[in-house]
Amino acid sequence: MIKKLIRKILGVKGKEAPSGPVILGPQQHGIDPRLLSNNAVRVTSTLQEAGYQAFVVGGAVRDLLLGVKPKDFDIATNATPEQVKRLFRRAFIIGKRFQIVHVMFGQDLLEVTTFRGPAVDNAPKDEHGRVLRDNTFGTQAEDAERRDFTINAMYYNPATQEVLDYHGGIEDIRAKTLRIIGVPEARYREDPVRMLRVVRFAAKLQFAIEQHTAAPIRVMAPLINNVPAARVFDEMLKLLMSGHALACLQQLRKEGLHHGLLPLLDVVLEQPLGFKFVTLALDSTDRRIHAGKTVSPGFLFASLLWHQVLEKWNAYLAAGEFAIPALHQAADDVLDSQTEKLALQRKIGSDMRDIWSMQPRFERRTGKNPYKLLEHTRFRAGYDFLLLRCASGEIDTELGQWWTAFYEGDETARETLIAGLQSQSQGGGGAKRKRPPRRAPRNREGGNGGGGGGDSAPAPAHSDGE
Ligand code: ATP
Ligand code: MG
């Protein structure tokens, strides 16, 4: 309040202190109503017919203004969660920190949120100032003020086709700028996840981060360590699945935010082999997302942490352990430390373990071994992973090429491939190196790179079953 008064006296036209919303009609904002989902319109009109205010809000409005079809729709209303629930057949009140209503139509889920008021002074906070719980309702203007960035704080009414803009979001969209609402330090302290969000939006939308919004991040980054791991994990997953994972990670590094998010990710990224591997994995993830294909989080995290596994695997091998148990121990070590810090879900962890432990099996190409491996339920993911290893220069590209031929070949081709290897090894020559039995991996510290860059390997796709 005092801040607003001072601004008024000084005549500062701050984006933080709007007098009321700027209202834009369809001619001014240019939103194509066809980008709106029928269910979003259904929810807002049901609420409005019952006498409440209801708007599409947040990321959906931002995307509509950018001419992009939103992937989901959030609705804001002045109806309380109970009032919302009563209007829909399949509606569920969820959430502790702040209650919201999930309205379902078939598979489609819409989040309906009651306008939120300013955090009350006595709202429970942790010792670093992070707000733990507050469930105060408020006006639309107050709701806008609590949102994170100006471009995420606009409301669209499908009935009137008007956009309500409280914080200069339209201007910032046009200038491709990410600007936090309010005092940046205070907003990051309340919720450090906003630092990750700004990075994700900057990379995804290719927007610049406004100077005052960016400035405190480097210093305040450690606050992210106090956020519950599950929430950081959700945000990391969003970031990695945004279709701009590579750009996001580069931006994270640029803002000094990569430390502690994926423990040791920074170390991995600084090793030449690890860096190439992670880059290829993320690039292929991004391409899959743009092509509308699915991406498995297990594959993604298996890739990000592979070089950590490799390092430990090599250490166990050096200590005299056999290849397969050594790999399992290395996987356990990495998963144990990450499960705690990253809140990796059990299913993701077991997918990662499957992908990793399949790797030495690709080296066994005699007799029935390759056929057995082909039947593995996660073969496709393991094979894609193998191709990444080839492409990054970690292992000989010959192995990947052989498996591609085997995977795609018919029965005769497969037999020929296996026979070809046998005759090669009997002849004792050629490309195949002699290794001590049950000793892997082939790249000891620093990697023997095999065929080198490996750019000839096919681009890996990665999920189970295309
Ligand atoms: P995406 O395209 O990733 O879904 P989004 O902006 O819709 O982006 P959501 O996490 O779906 O992101 O959040 C919806 C809206 O809720 C945001 O646009 C923003 O207005 C508000 N919001 C979300 N997280 C925060 C936060 N940590 N602090 C303040 N406001 C937030
Ligand atoms: Mg959203």
Image (cartoon, rainbow, N blue to C red):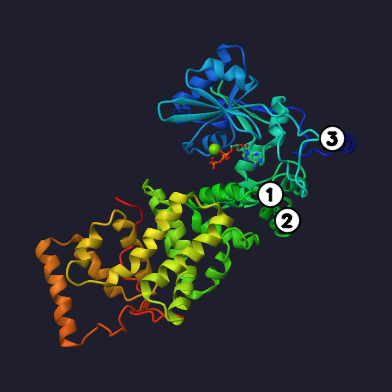
Q: Is residue 170 visible?
A: no
The mark lying in front, picked from 3 and 1, is 1
Residue closest to the far top: 50
Mark 3, residue position? 4
Q: Are marks 2 and 1 in contact (CB under 8 Å)?
A: yes
Mark sitting on residue 220: 2
Residue density around tag 3, few if under 14, some if 14–19, many if 20 or more, within 10 Å: some
Residue 429 position, x and y percent, is 20, 87
Secondary structure category for the residue under label 2: helix
Taking the image as four quarters, which one is ligand 1 found in?
top right
Earlier in the chain: of badge 3 and badge 1, it is: 3
What residue is shown at x 42% (from left), y 64% (from top)? Answer: 280
Kindly identify the amino acid type of the residue bearing the numbered disc 2. Met
For the residues labelled 3 and 1, the Cα–Cα distance comes to: 25 Å
Residue 358 position, x and y percent, is 33, 64
What residue is shown at x 50% (from left), y 64% (from top)? Answer: 334
Kindly identify the amino acid type of the residue bearing the numbered disc 3. Lys
Secondary structure category for the residue under label 1: loop
For the residues labelled 2 and 1, the Cα–Cα distance comes to: 8 Å
Mark 1, residue position? 192
